[in-house]
Image (cartoon, rainbow, N blue to C red):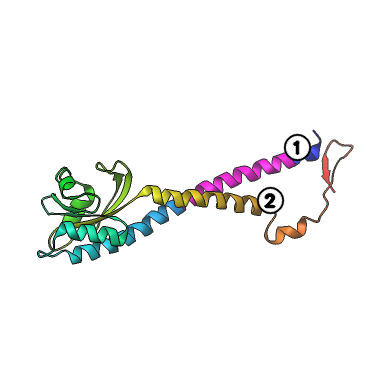
Amino acid sequence: MRLTGRLLLGVLGVVGVLVAFMVFVVARQLSGRLREETADVLSREARFVAASWTVDTDPFALAQRAGTSLGRRVTLIRPDGVVVGDSDFDRDGMAHLENHGRRPEVVAALAGSVGNALRTSSSRGDEELYVAVRGTVGVARVSVPTAALEAIVASSRRGIGFATFMHGSGFTGSGEKYLASVVGVEATPEGKVRVV
């Protein structure tokens, strides 16, 4: 293989490693930021549901309406941990749900904080981001499957990789003026390489 071919392969190899590194770093930051933003939105939604839950409200009906309106899973939990409303279950199905009193997001909400947890749902079997807040009657929890968030990050990786490769290869920005340039390499009598 000629020297120019080896140089080109070397440059492409370096650009490839840099692209992979950039995709990893940016996707990781995007994933973290997306989860933070989603947790903030879920927190606002949970506060709204908690404010709507009064002693005169049917918690099952409220969870169903709120879940449909928000497009999320909404769970209403008494202070003793018993689930009294869940948008994913009918009344009979709720009877089989375990006590939620020890769930980390519920414990935090009962203590007066905004409860946040990222874990596998024991009733649905998928990983979910949970946010819970305490209301006057109990705890309102809103959750979203993390698969939806990961799909956004995965689709972004391809675009980030392509853009980084094109930019790193000089096909964007001011690098375009260099594409018309001609580069040559020659060996000197001393055995060194000179770029001409």
| Rendering coords of residue 116 (x, y %) | 27, 53
In what element is the residue under mark 2? Answer: loop
Give left or right: position of 190 versus 145: right
Q: Check disc 1 and give the amino acid type.
A: Arg
In the displayed structure image, the side of residue 161 where residue 35 appears, left or right: left
In the rendered image, residue 7, in percent from the top left (x then y), is placed at 75, 40
Quarter where residue 109 is shown: bottom left
Which percent across, then down, holds residue 45? Answer: 28, 62
Residue in the foreground of this view, choosing between 153 and 173: 153
Q: Residue at x 77, y 57 (%)?
A: 178
User: What whole-number distance in Å separates the C-alpha atoms at marks 2 and 1?
Assistant: 16 Å
* Residue 10 percent across, percent down from the top left: 70, 40
Q: Is residue 113 visible?
A: no
For the question of whether residue 86 can be seen, the reply is yes
Say if 174 sits above or below 80 in the image.
below
Find disc 1 in the rendering and name its residue. Answer: 6
**Which quadrant would the N terminus be assigned to in this image?**
top right
Q: Is residue 139 above or below residue 15?
A: below
Sequence-wise first label, 2 or 1: 1
As for residue 19 lying within the magenta part, the answer is yes
Q: What mark, if any, has residue 169 been given in the picture? A: 2
Residue in front for this viewpoint, 4 or 47:
47
- Above or below for 44 versus 189: below
Determine whether the residue tagged by mark 1 lies in a helix, strand or loop: helix
Residue lying at 10% horizontally and 51% vertically, measured from the top left = 80
Specify few, some or many for label 1: CA neighbours under 10 Å numbering under 14, 14-19, or 20 or more. Answer: few
In the image, what residue type sits under mark 2? Ser
The magenta segment: 8-29
